[in-house]
Amino acid sequence: MKNILFTMLFLLAAYVINAQGFYELEAKTIDGKTFSFEELKGKKVLIVNTASKCGYTPQYEDLQKLYEEYKNKNFVILGFPANDFLKQEPGSNSEIEMFCSLNYGVSFPMMEKISVKGKDMHPVYKWLTDKDKNGLEDSKVKWNFQKYFIDENGKLITHFQPSIKPFDDEIIKLIAN
């Protein structure tokens, strides 16, 4: 019995040591400023990798509507432009910012263009996709507009495939509860 208890405590300690907290992360905004995830404490967060030349690009419209509807209820969306899938985000940060503003009126925080897979994967996406870091699951970003939902305590709750639209019932339930 002592061996089982010791093993369980050891595994728990190893998890706590290895797990990186969501609020320890940071990224650069699309205009180059450092954004500390500590600013997100107490908020529910939807993180989305975006692209301007993708079949899912029209999701920007619903992402903006979702943000407008729930931003005053401790909810935020973070957009992370990425050029990892068929080069569907070729623009510079300023071109991406202009595209999002002019075409979709995006006012939710947009981060600088990053990589969401491979050897250049941004630390935020390392956290989102690695169970040892996020404490929930391993995952792979399969395409543009994949969504990750983090609760108000900085805990990864789930992720949604790119085809899942921003106003999907499951996403709304997570925001509203």
Image (tube, rainbow, N blue to C red):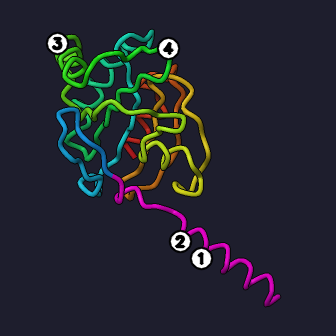
Q: Quadrant of residue 152?
A: bottom left
Q: Residues within 10 Å of mark 3 (few under 14, many from 20)?
A: few
Q: Residues within 10 Å of mark 4 (few under 14, many from 20)?
A: few
Q: CA distance from mark 3 to mark 2?
A: 45 Å
Residue 17's label in the rendered image is: 2
Q: Earlier in the sequence, mark 2 or mark 4?
A: 2
- For mark 4, what is the residue? 86
- Placement of the N terminus among the 4 image quadrants: bottom right
Amino acid on which the number 4 mark rests in the picture: Leu
Give the extent of the magenta segment. 1-25
- For mark 3, what is the residue? 102
Amino acid on which the number 1 mark rests in the picture: Ala
Q: Is residue 159 left or right of residue 12?
A: left
User: What residue appears at the point 79 percent right and 90 percent down from the top-left corner?
Assistant: 2
- For mark 1, what is the residue? 13
Q: Is residue 99 left or right of residue 85?
A: left
Q: Are marks 4 and 3 in contact (CB under 8 Å)?
A: no
Picture coordinates of residue 136, whole percent (x, y): 58, 53
